[in-house]
Amino acid sequence: MSSLIAADATGLFKQRSFVLFLLSRSFSRFSSQIGGVAIGWQVYDLTGSAFDLGMVGLVGFLPTAVLMFVAGHAADRYPRKRVVQLCQLGEALTALYLAAGAGAGWLTVPGIFIAMLVLGTATAFESPATAALLPVIAPQGSLQRATAVMSGVGQLASITGPAMGGLAFAVSPGLPYGMMVLFWLAGALSTGGIHLPHLERLRDAASPADLFAGVRFVRDNPAILGTISLDLFAVLLGGATALLPIYARDILQTGPLGLGILRAAPAIGALLMTAALARHAINRRVGLRMFQAVIVFGLATMVFALSHVMWLSVLALAVLGAADTVSVVIRFSLVQLATPDEMRGRVGAVNFLFINASNQLGQFESGITAALFGAMPAVLIGGVGTIAIALLWMKLFPTLRQFEQLE
């Protein structure tokens, strides 16, 4: 046993830089969740098209696919907190454009897609830099708890963000975007106050070998490859949240506020689970626990697909969020602990590509499937596919299934 005793959640909150880091991530998450409600509802309201709703996810994913290697190298070459701060400022300016257009009535679907491209570009650079900061800021031996706390505080923003975003949109289409401006600016200020315990290592000019080092690292580590690819395919198929505007308006017969509640439900389940994980870390059979969580995720998706009542839909989404959190904490902790600091940006970029592909392309896949078969069959097929992927991955990656604990 290590002589270092992992700090509990209470001890983490005594670290000023860790608290600022949590605030920065929460403000960004708050803005993103508000934007998810406002943009999704506005696009569907303007077009009434499930295909256009799915296109929101594809447009948001494209910058990550194109800029992944450059963004990962930037996170390892330049001061990471400055990269995060500049991205948050760019996101605030983009939200200001959306607020002005929605408030004045001239914002169109192509204009929204252009803004999504800018936001996607900022996120592509921000995410690997953020992921690489946490292992440096968190006290040694406490990364799993720090990850759980970070996820929990972010989910708290996700609970209130969608509900407030839906309410704000009902008051005025420009109001939610104005709220996003304020929160992203607050996030940039919080990021600027973070003190790093040591100077970050700056790298020389990039070579092709440097840019692709993260891909090679993931490829050569079966446990990491299995972990992030499982998340990719499971969430790619189980993207029920992409179709929430359709469920809110056409199936459950609710409005923008109801949509906000539905979007907040996974965060409620996630918050409860992260509170448990922050107090009781997963110390045994972590690989099997992750597979079990993905199977529960698929089952909850199937229940949501078939539900016609609000309370059951909210409950299914909450279970879905709790199961996903187990996978997130294990995946993030495993990847960060197994990666040397000088490569965390590039490996984080690869990981984020998988995450973003699962979320954004999953939204696109759900939109296309819903356009072909209807919303309910699309979500049901996704839930069944998620379970099938988990069972298949248990066969393909036995090392990951037998993974015992996070050192």
Image (cartoon, rainbow, N blue to C red):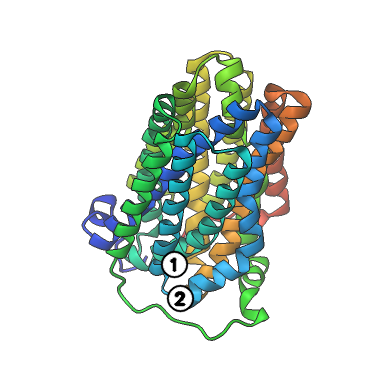
Residue 77's x, y, as percent? 49, 77
Q: Is residue 330 left or right of residue 281?
A: right
Residue 398's x, y, as percent? 67, 54
Question: At 68% across and 28% down in the image, what residue appears?
Answer: 49
Q: Amino acid at mark 1?
A: Val
Residue 56's x, y, as percent? 62, 41
Q: Secondary structure at mark 2?
A: loop
* Front position in the image: 154 or 14: 154
Question: In 3D space, how far apart are the residues under numbered discs 2 and 1 (Cα atoms)?
Answer: 7 Å
Residue 46's x, y, as percent? 61, 29
Q: Which residue is mark 2?
A: 78
Q: Is 13 drawn above or below residue 303 in the view shown?
A: below
Q: Quadrant of the N terminus?
A: bottom left
* Front position in the image: 54 or 266: 54
Q: Is 82 drawn above or below residue 272 in the view shown?
A: below
Along the polypeptide, which appears first: circle 2 or circle 1?
2
Local crowd at mark 1 within 10 Å, few (<14), some, or many (≥20)? many
Marks 2 and 1 close (CB-CB < 8 Å): yes
Q: Secondary structure at mark 1?
A: helix
Residue 187 in which image quadrant: bottom left
Say whether residue 194 is visible: yes
Local crowd at mark 2 within 10 Å, few (<14), some, or many (≥20)? some
